[in-house]
Amino acid sequence: MTSSQQTPQPDRRTDGPEVDHAPGHAPDHPPVHAHGHGHTPAAPVSRHLRRVIAAVLIPFAAAVVVGLVALWPGGAPAHERTGVGFDRQTEEARVVRVEQVDCKDVNAGQVPPTGDTSAPEGGAAVNSRQEACKKATVEVTTGKDKGRTFVEVVQPDASRQLKQGQEVVVAYAPDAPRDLQYSVSDVNREFPMALLAGIFALVVVLVGRMRGVMALIALALSFAVLTLFILPAILQGSNPLVVAVVGASAIMLMALYMCHGLTARTSVAVLGTLISLLLIGLLGSLFIGWASLSGNTDDNTGLIHGLFPNIDMSGLLLAGVIIGSLGVLDDVTVTQTSAVWELHQADPGMGPRGLYKAGIRIGRDHIASVVNTLVLAYAGASLPLLLLFSIAESSVGTVATSELVAEEIVRTLIGSIGLVASVPVTTALAALVVSADRPGGTVTGAMTGAVRGKGRRRRAK
């Protein structure tokens, strides 16, 4: 009676650890049932597969480093300021006093010389004459003229109204008459923006913990690559497409490996992202050239072209497509790889075909949501432009084929094609790699798992 009570105990103790440490299996393979929930570390792949992945990724990483060194700009080129748009010298200032004055006394709200008050500017002038204007005294708080004051007249219909104590940004024109050298160009938003960034970082760390910290570090490094390498290298005259590919690859390697670890799972996501970026680059180069998109469509791009005429503006447009698609691509490839890994851990006997079919079903839901997100993001960014076309009552065909809108359409569709293609590509790569995660390969690993399963059932009897 005593021996019969003790018989099941060894079976329970040996139903797992002893099987996973059986001869012929790597001792670092954890029991399959220990990974039934999400966010668990992936089982290590075989040494042979690690070597294959390293043989692909190490030369790629080395090429990225060589590209960074060869194209490193050493800073943006100097140029003489034009005083137009963002190319102005600015200082910080503060509004020290605001007075109500009659618009006639400060020559504001004057009717146009034609006397036509039906035009927009004429109607605004009449309205201004019926209301009080503001005369703001502004004190410069930085630069060589710190402490100097000037007067800014604010009309009642102005979009930006100044108030006492408000921090502002002022533009400085050294060649203008002394009384006109300074003018308010914007509001100083440093504090609210810094506070919002701090709240964002706090939320990421509280929810993501160590992963959140690594994500913030990766974000800082991505921003550094963008501002210290990509933008100055383009300004120095390097090919925007080459610069974007090298910079995006560096961002991808840093962000994925820092956030998700130096694992085979992350490496598969890197490969899927790389293949998708190459597809986006090829399609972008083809259709941007075919549609004759110049990339010079607004005041900002016109200013850039005027200051640096050697920059290839269509190449700059293509570079923007590649960099803009990278962030969403990372999300798709990491999610698909993780899904395939979890499916394999839930059913180790599932072969690559079964893993691909199950993973692609998950990916279809991901495709629908991500494509919709990308289209809405671009539409939201171009909403003022779309409103202008709506006001003009232009036809859909005219709007869609105009260069301003065509750029956004091409950007959206090419990015979406790359995102959609990344799902089957990454899923297939993950299925092939994870199904061969034992030294014996896919078939041998599956057979070994079946034998081990039979052994457990025999002992359970």
Image (cartoon, grey):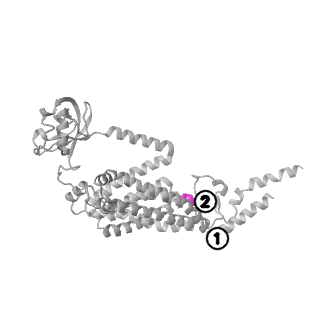
The x, y position of residue 424, in whole percent, is 51, 65
Which comes before the other along the chain, label 2 or label 1? Answer: 2
Disc 2 crowd, CA 10 A, few/some/many (<14, 14-19, 20+): many
Answer with left or right where residue 298 lies relative to residue 19: left
Q: Main secondary structure of the magenta part?
A: helix
Q: Is residue 343 left or right of residue 296?
A: right
Real-space CA distance between mark 2 and mark 1, rounded to the nearest whole angstrom: 17 Å
* Residue 175 appears left or right of 70: left
| Residue numbers of the magenta segment | 336-343
- Disc assigned to residue 377: none
Q: Residue at x 35, y 38 (%)?
A: 192
For the residues bearing labels 2 and 1, Cβ distance under 8 angstroms:
no
Q: Which element is circle 2 on? A: helix
User: Which amino acid, mark 2?
Assistant: Leu
Question: 340 and 57: which one is in front?
Answer: 340
Q: Residue at x 25, y 62 (%)?
A: 311
Disc 1 designates what residue? 443
Rendering coords of residue 45 (x, y %): 58, 63
Q: Is residue 68 visible in this depiction of the protein?
A: no
Q: Which residue is mark 2?
A: 343
Residue 79: image x %, image y %? 19, 54
Q: Amino acid at mark 1?
A: Val
